[in-house]
Image: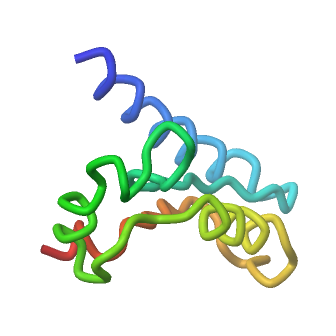
Amino acid sequence: MAYSASKFAVTGMKKVAALELGKYQIRANSIHPSLVNTGMFSESSGGNSVASDRPLGRVLTAEEVSNLVLHLASDESSYTTGAECVIDGGLTAR
């Protein structure tokens, strides 16, 4: 229950921040990645079954997460606020 509560807290904080800070041109978004191919978890250590669950057929990389972070922090996303950016290879589309 604590895990779910903390995830929802991030969503609530993001929404409040977007509403209250927008007048100052401060943007607030949240990023929700699925499993990331890192030293702690990799496709070679059992991640192949996880990868096969995703429509893209592979596990997310740390670089892909950082690319989204850079995009949201840049002026290219100057009109994006209050967004939940799910980066899961299409898993939630199922």
Q: Give the percent coordinates (x, y) of residue 29.
A: 61, 56
Q: Residue furthest top?
A: 2
Q: Give the percent coordinates (x, y) of residue 47.
A: 30, 55
Residue 68 position (above or below residue 15): below
In the visual, does 25 lie left or right of 20?
A: right
Q: Residue furthest front?
A: 44
Residue 8 position (above or below residue 20): above
Task: Please report the residue visible at 46 percent of the width from the left and 65 percent of the height from the top.
Answer: 60
Q: Nearer the viewer, residue 87 or 16?
A: 87
In the visual, does 6 lie left or right of 82?
A: left
Q: Nearer the viewer, residue 81 or 51?
A: 51
Task: Please report the residue visible at 27 percent of the width from the left and 66 percent of the height from the top.
Answer: 51
Label tally: 0
Task: Please report the residue visible at 54 percent of the width from the left and 55 percent of the height from the top.
Answer: 31
Q: Give the percent coordinates (x, y) of residue 30.
A: 56, 52
Residue 6 position (above or below residue 16): above
